[in-house]
Image (cartoon, grey):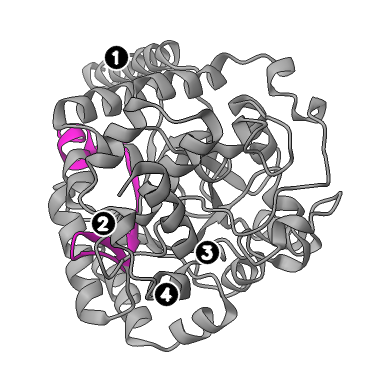
Amino acid sequence: MKKIYTLLLTALCLVAVGCKQQKQTDMKFRPLGNTGLMVSEISIGCGGFEKLDSAASLELMTMALDSGMNYIDIYDANPKTRSNIGYALQGRRDEMIIQGHIGTIWANGQHTRTRDLDSTKAGFEDLLARLGTDHIEVGMIHITDSREEWEEIQNSPFLDYVFQLKKEGKIKHIGLSSHNAEVALMAAKSGWVEVIMFSLNPAFDRLRGGAIPWDKGAMENLQAGIDPVRVEFYDYCATHKIGVTVMKTFGGGGKLLDAKTSPLGVAYTPEQCIAYCLAKPCISTCILGIDNLDELKRDLHWLHATDEEKDYTTVGQQTTAEKGGDCTYCNHCSPCTQGIPIAKVNELLDKAETDGMTPELQSKYDALPHHAGECTHCGACMNRCPFGVDIPAKMDKAKERFGK
C-alpha cells in the first residue's frame, strides 16, 4: 500500500511539474521526422554568438531556453562561436537538441568547408570539446549543393566517418544541409539521411527547376507557384517522415523583412515568414538567425501572434525580382587568400548602399582584420561562391565606399 501511495504521489508531482512548464512557455513542438525527438517550432541559429561575449551569450541562450526553444544549429567553426555556445549551455545541455555540422573547420582565421578526412575529424572533435559534450543529436553533413557533390560523398571515407560517428553514439542521427531541391530530394530518398536542413522562404520556393537561389539569373526567373521539384521534396519528406529544418527563413541576411532588399519587392514580417514555412507538414522547425536579445524578443512574438499577423497570403506575390548574384553572407566563399572576411564586408557595403553611410558602419568596417582594398582579384572566392556574386567587383566598391 505504501508503495502504491508513493507511486501516486510521484505521478502527481510529475503532472504538477508538467503544468508548471506549460505555464512558463507557449511554445509548440513538432516531431523531427522519425528521430523520436520533439523540437520547438522556432529555434536558434549560431551566427549571433560570434558577435557576443560569454556573458551576453549566456543571457541570450537563457532567454531562448526559457522561452521553450530546444533546438540549435551550429554550422560555424569559429572557435569563439562554439565556445560561447558551450559556455551558455553549461548546466542546461540536456534541454537543447544540437544540430552540429560535419565538414566545417576553422582554418587561417576563416570558416571553411572541407571533405578532407583528417580535417573533418579534427573539426568535429573541436566542436564536441568546445560545447563540453560527448555527443550531438544531429550530425549534419555540411552544405551539399550539386549532384556532383552528392555523388562524391557516396562510398567515400568522409561518409564512412559519418556512419562511424553514429555507430559510436557521437551523433544520434544523420542529416545533410542543402540549398538545392534536387539534391535535397536525392538525400531524402537515400534511406540513410534522417534530417535535412533546407533553405526555404516565399521567394526561394518560386525558383524554377530545382535551382539554388544563387544560380546566375535564378532570381530573375521566379514563377507564380511553388517549383514542382520543391513540391515533390516536401511531399516525400512528409510522407516518409523525414525531418526538415529550415534555414534562411527570412531570406539571406533577413532581406525578406525589408521591401528595399526583398527579392519579391515587398516586405514580409517575421511571423509571416515563419507561418509560411510551418504551413508545410514536413517542416519541423524554423532556425532563426538571432544576433541579440532584441531580435530574439522580436522573433518570440511568434508565440503570441494572432492569425491575422501570421497571414502571409495578404502579402503581394510579385513575380519580378532583383537581379541574380546577390550575396546572402553565407561564408561559402571562404577562405579568402588575403584573409578578408568577405561576407562581413559585403554585409556592411549593402547596408551602406541601402540605408546610407554612417559613422557606425565605417567604424565596424575599420575594425575588420583585413579590408576590401587587399583583394588581389585572384578569383578563388568566385570558384566557391554558390551565389554567382561578382566578389572582386564588390570588393572594389567597398574599397571606394570605405576608403581602404
Instruction: Give the residue at mark 3.
Output: 390
Q: Residue at x 48, y 67 (%)?
A: 385
Amino acid type at circle 4 is: Gly
Q: Earlier in the sequence, mark 1 or mark 2?
A: 1
Most foreground residue, 24 or 20: 24
Instruction: Indicate which disc, 4 or 1, sits on the residue closer to the N terminus.
Output: 1
Residue 64 in percent (x, y) is at 35, 26
Q: Nearer the viewer, residue 14 or 148?
A: 148
Q: Amino acid at mark 1?
A: Leu
Q: Earlier in the sequence, mark 3 or mark 1?
A: 1
Using the numbered discs, state the Cα–Cα distance from disc 3 to disc 2 in whole angstroms: 25 Å
Residue type pointed to by label 3: Asp
| Side of 51 relative to 312 (left or right) | left
Q: Nearer the viewer, mark 3 or mark 1?
A: 3
Quick one: SS at disc 1? helix
Residue 176 appears in the figure: no
The residue at which mark 1 appears reads as 9
Three-letter amino acid code at disc 2?
Answer: Ala
Q: Work out whether mark 4 precedes mark 2 in sequence or the reverse, and give the earlier one.
A: 2
Identify the residue position indicated by label 4 in the image. 379
Residue at 22 percent of width and 16 percent of height: 2
Tag 3 secondary structure: loop
Residue 61 sits in which quadrant? top left
- Which residue, given by chain and number where applicable, does mark 2 sit on? 77
